Amino acid sequence: MIHSVKLSLLTSTITTLIVMLSALLIAYSLSEDSFRGKSIVKTVLDIPIAFPEILIGIMLLIFLGNTPLNYMMDGLGIQIVFTDLGVICAQFFVSLPYTVRICYSTFCNIDRRLKFVSRSLGYTEFETFRNIMIPLSRDGILAATIITFSRCIGCFGAVLIVAGGTYQKTDTLPISLYLNLSYGNVEMAVASGIFLMIISFITIFFLEKMGAYGNEFSGYR
């Protein structure tokens, strides 16, 4: 159980950081640029939301199977399937579409004139993004972080397919719950569920408090 808790917290935290960085860049680019095929790109990014996690896991397993990418990673000594990296990979592709959607909506709701004023005052594109867009998107980014971590900590189907759900190796809390229930160990399955609920509650409550504190501080300033 301790192993499952540590693995869930570690992989979910790492994945959340990677997803947030990727989603912010993708969402900002989509909200700023108009190009041919933009609707197709947005549709492709949104499609996994409608997929069951098991399907995402199967697609990742096929993509990471006997393909040139797999051979290249093997040559570099990187193994994804049935490892902790597989857990992170599965969590990433399950949670990314939700995060991109939230961040995209957040950026689109910001007044474009503020960006134009920033650029006219000499800020570069990156400085405008860092000093204007990110602070104004704070609530949306916080909401995206909560959703992302929640999706990662509760990710099951894709992790089971890609990481294998090996006992004492890739068994995150949802996988541990499933394995113990399969073994008939109801007490441990219930314990896994309780740990999962406690961790989720503490994390979301902590992020909500951070958001409330940040809003009060901004108002004070």
Image (cartoon, rainbow, N blue to C red):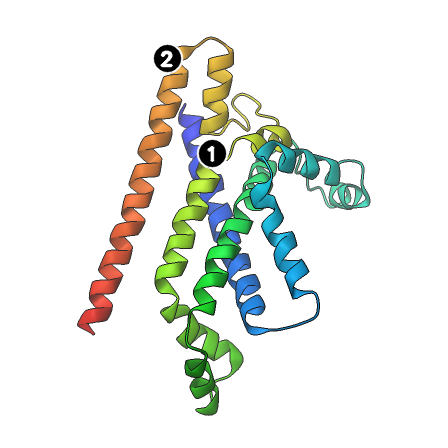
Question: Which of the numbered marks, if any, corresponds to residue 37?
Answer: none
Secondary structure under the numbered disc 2 in the rendered image: helix
Where does the image place residue 21, in percent across and percent down from the top left? 51, 59
State which quarter of the image contains the N terminus: top left
Q: Is residue 62 left or right of residue 11?
A: right
Residue drawn at (34%, 35%), measured in percent from left and top? 199
**Circle 2: residue type:** Glu
Q: Foreground residue, 166 or 116?
A: 116
Where does the image place residue 169, in percent across and percent down from the top left? 55, 26
Q: Is residue 203 left or right of residue 178?
A: left
Question: Which of the numbered marks, if any, corresponds to residue 187?
Answer: 2
Secondary structure under the numbered disc 1 in the rendered image: helix
**Circle 1: residue type:** Leu
Where does the image place residue 135, in percent across and percent down from the top left? 37, 70
Q: Foreground residue, 152 or 82?
A: 152
Q: Earlier in the sequence, mark 1 or mark 2?
A: 1
| Residue 27 sits above or below residue 13 on the image | below
* Label 1 Cα neighbours within 10 Å, binned few <14 / some 14-19 / many ≥20: many
State which quarter of the image contains the C terminus: bottom left
The residue under label 1 is 7
| Residue 24 sits above or below residue 156 on the image | below
* Label 2 Cα neighbours within 10 Å, binned few <14 / some 14-19 / many ≥20: few
| Residue 128 sits above or below residue 212 on the image | below
Q: Which picture quadrant has residue 154? A: top left
| Residue 137 sits above or below residue 191 on the image | below
Q: Is residue 215 left or right of residue 187?
A: left
Q: CA distance from mark 1 to mark 2?
A: 20 Å
